[in-house]
Image: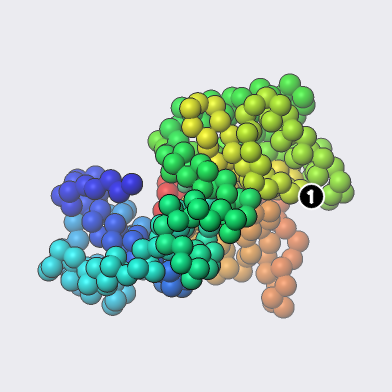
Amino acid sequence: MSKRKAPSDDSDPNHDFCEFLTELADYEKNVVRNIHKYNAYRKAASTLAKLTYRIKSGQEARKLDGIGDKISKKIDEFLETGKLRKLENIRSDDSSTAIKELTRVSGIGPAKAKELYDLGITNINHLSNNVDKLNHHQKLGLKYLDDFETKIPRSEIKNVEEIINSTLSSIDSEFKVTICGSYRRGKDFSGDIDVLITHPAFTSNESKKLKNNKLHMVVDVLKKNNLITETISLGETKFMGVCKVGTLSRRLDIRLNPYDQFYCSVLYFTGSDIFNKEMRDHALSKGFTLNEYTLRPIGSTGVPGEPVEVQSEEDIFEYLDYPYKKPEDRNM
Ligand code: 8GT
Ligand code: MN
Ligand code: MN
């Protein structure tokens, strides 16, 4: 999993710091379940990842956005000793190790992992003998663990995109399909496939019944076509499941969002999650609330008003006085 690079690598001069910060972030998310600390470590890693020069001391790092006293001390410790005591302790702790392993399974979050650990289940092998403790999603996560941990090359996602496009256009030429997530951000490899679908006949002010039928219809036709092989969950607007075009099974997410809310949806679903969080925080500082559907001004009473009209992703940035970032510049 970890692709180690020498710290001197020109393209990524602070890679080793980012690596330990990411490991600490995952520990905070999965074991401690402190989402604030998780965000703080991720933010610091993202700041360091953007630098084109090597950080020489904690003091130097301290001047950067999102790096405080504690993280700058860790950078010093790492520079002086080549490791971190905190990480050494985490790595040698049984419950941390077990929770880290169990959360590899799609559908097993930190709380479920802790529950399993408390039942004495400490590794994947144990888990395979205790599938009765798992729900439908978690069972599929275990079944396809190896496949889901294998990154998906762009070419394969492009293939899926073409299959979905041609399948949907053969039933209704007005479907609009956009592959979002890390693929839209230009990554060479992705963890899953995130598909956003809209249709002009499905807008935010119409009855729920129609959208219900539409996503079910989409999933049905993609199943008949043998693209979708498993369903994890299927709601009115959200499908989670599994698809297969090559030799491996892949996690597939589909969203069906209203046509008039396409640009907020595509922004949200493109991510990254850290980028989304920064943009939402920025929106709040400008007196707006931004979500997967709309951008709304917050009035003096604190109640969000009517959504502003948005004709492009750029419009959203412009409303917020936020310098436009192309999808490939949202990898943080
Ligand atoms: P990946 O290559 O690991 O899949 O990277 P990704 O494509 O950036 O991550 P993702 O987890 O597939 O999320 C893509 C976007 O979908 C995120 O930016 C986020 O806003 C949105 N998203 C959802 N549901 C969820 C969810 O349950 N977890 C996460 N992490 N993101 C979600 O729509
Ligand atoms: Mn994704
Ligand atoms: Mn996803």
Q: Which residue is drawn at 68% across and 38% down?
A: 197
For this view, does 122 lie left or right of residue 184? left
For this view, does 165 lie left or right of residue 251? right
Would you say residue 48 is visible in this rendering?
Answer: no
Above or below, 160 relative to 237: above
Above or below, 247 relative to 35: above
Q: Mark 1 points at which residue?
A: 204
Instruction: Report the coloring of the rendering.
Output: rainbow
- In the current view of this chain or complex, which residue is farthest to the front? 129
For this view, does 260 lie left or right of residue 279? right
Where residue 140 appears, x then y in whole percent? 57, 45
For this rendering, which residue is in front, 101 or 192?
101
Above or below, 70 relative to 186: below
Mark 1 secondary-structure assignment = loop
Specify the amino acid type for callout 1.
Ser
For this view, does 138 lie left or right of residue 20? right
Q: Which residue is drawn at 63% across and 58% down?
A: 291
Above or below, 2 relative to 44: above
Where residue 87 appears, x then y in whole percent? 27, 68
Q: Residue at x 76, y 48 (%)?
A: 236
For this rendering, which residue is in front, 300 or 163?
163
Quadrant for residue 178, please give it.
top right
